[in-house]
Amino acid sequence: MNAMNFIEPEERIALRKAVAELGAKYGHEYYARKARADEKTHELWDEAGRLGYLGVNVPEEYGGGGAGIADLAAVLEELAAAGSPLLLMVVSPAICGTVISRFGTEEQKKQWLPGIADGTKRMVFAITEPDAGSNSHKITTTAKRDGGGWVLNGRKVYISGVDEADAVLVVGRMEDSKTGRLKPALFILPANTEGFEYTKIPMDIVAPENQFSLFLDDVHLPAEALVGEEDAAIAQLFAGLNPERIMGASFSLGIARYALSKAVGYANQRQVWGTPIGAHQGLAHPLAEIKIELELAKLMTQKAASLYDSGDDFGAGESANMAKYAAAEVAIRATDQAVQTHGGNGLATEYGLGTLVTAVRLGRIAPVSREMVLNFVGQHSLGLPKSY
C-alpha cells in the first residue's frame, strides 16, 4: 500500500481470502475448546506454517515469503476475524523473525529463520520485568562475559508461550567496554538451557497461550548467542517493537471484526415484536459507530505497516503506537456491544463471545500500555514536555 493508495495490492487481498478460508475451517469453537482444555492450537499453527502464512515476512533465502510486516499483519487479522487469534504470531515471526533477519549473524539466520517461517520452530520474546515494566532502561537482567561466552542472571514476567518455545529471545544488559555503563543486548536462549526455569502465571483469560515468570540463574550461553552487533543493541530492540505494535493492532482488529460480525448477524436474525432488533437505533447506531472506528484503526495499522516496510522506523513508530491504541479501543467496544446486542446470550458459551471479554482487555495493556502510547504521542507528536 503506497502513500496515496488506500487499496491493498491484489496479492494481499488474495492472501487475506486464503487465510480467511483456513481460519473458517477451525473457527472460534475450536479455539475456545482448546483454550478451555488447556491445550494448544497446534493443528491451526502447523497448517498455517505448511501453507507459508506464518513466514510471509521472512526473507525468501531462509524459506519465507520475502514480503513485509503488512502481509504478516493481514494473516493475523484474518485468523482473528475467524475467531482463532494466534498470539504467538506477534512474537515468533514478527518480533523474533524480524530482529534475526535484520540483525542476526548468518549462522543465526540459517539456524532459526526457516523453522520460524514454516512454523516448526517457535521463539518467544522476553523483555518485561517485575520492577521495570515498560521502562527498557531499567532492565536488571544482566549479561556478563565469561571466557568466550556469557552468563545471564535475572527475572522476566508475563512472557507468552514459553511452554511452546524452542528458544527465548532475551533482552538483557551488558557492560559497555568503553564507558562501563550497561546497555541493552539481545540473546537467543534455547529453552532447554541449564539454569533457565519458568513458572506459569494463573490468568483469568481464556486463551490457549499461557503467561510465565522466567528465572535466569547463572545461565551460561556461548558467544554466538548474542544477536547482532554489540553497539547496535538499542536499534535492534526497537526494530522488533514496531512490528510487535503493528501485530498487536491486527490482533485487536481481527477480534473486533469477529465480534462485530456476530453482533450484526444476531441483530438481523433476532426478532422482537415482529421486527429484527437491528432496526432499533439503540442497537444500530452503536454498531455503526464501531464499524467506523474499526475502519479508521485499520487504515492507521496499514499506514504503520507501510511505513515500516519502506524503512521509515521513526514514522512507523508514531503510526504503530496510534494504530495499537485505536485497535485496542475498538476491540473492547466491539466485544462489549456484541455481548449487549445478544443480551443474556452474549455470555452463553454457545454464542462464542464471553471468552473474548477479558482477552480484548489485554490490548490496552500489552504490548505497550495505553498510557505509554499517550506519553509517546504527547512527547513526540505534540512536542509536550516529557512527563517521566
Image (cartoon, rainbow, N blue to C red):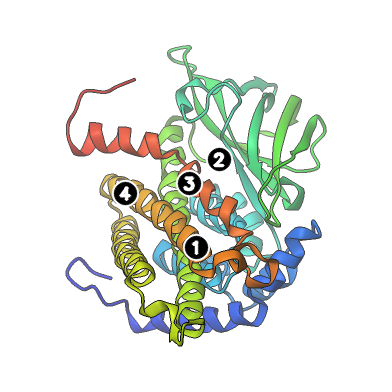
Q: Is residue 229 above or below residue 364?
A: above
Sooner in the amino-acid sequence: mark 2 or mark 3 = 3
Q: Which residue is mark 4?
A: 322
Q: Using residue 77 as the reference point, say whether residue 207 is left or right of it.
A: right
Mark 1 and mark 3: Cα distance apart in space: 47 Å
Q: Is residue 386 visible?
A: yes
Mark 1 and mark 2: Cα distance apart in space: 48 Å
Q: Secondary structure at mark 1?
A: helix
Mark 1, other Cα within 10 Å: few <14 / some 14–19 / many ≥20: some
Q: Nearer the viewer, mark 3 or mark 4?
A: 4
Name the one closer to the observer, 91 or 384: 384
Q: Which residue is mark 1?
A: 340
Q: Secondary structure at mark 4?
A: helix
Mark 2 and mark 3: Cα distance apart in space: 7 Å
Q: Amino acid at mark 2?
A: Val
Q: Nearer the viewer, mark 2 or mark 4?
A: 4
Q: Which residue is mark 2?
A: 227
Sooner in the amino-acid sequence: mark 1 or mark 3 = 3
Mark 3, other Cα within 10 Å: few <14 / some 14–19 / many ≥20: some
Sooner in the amino-acid sequence: mark 1 or mark 2 = 2
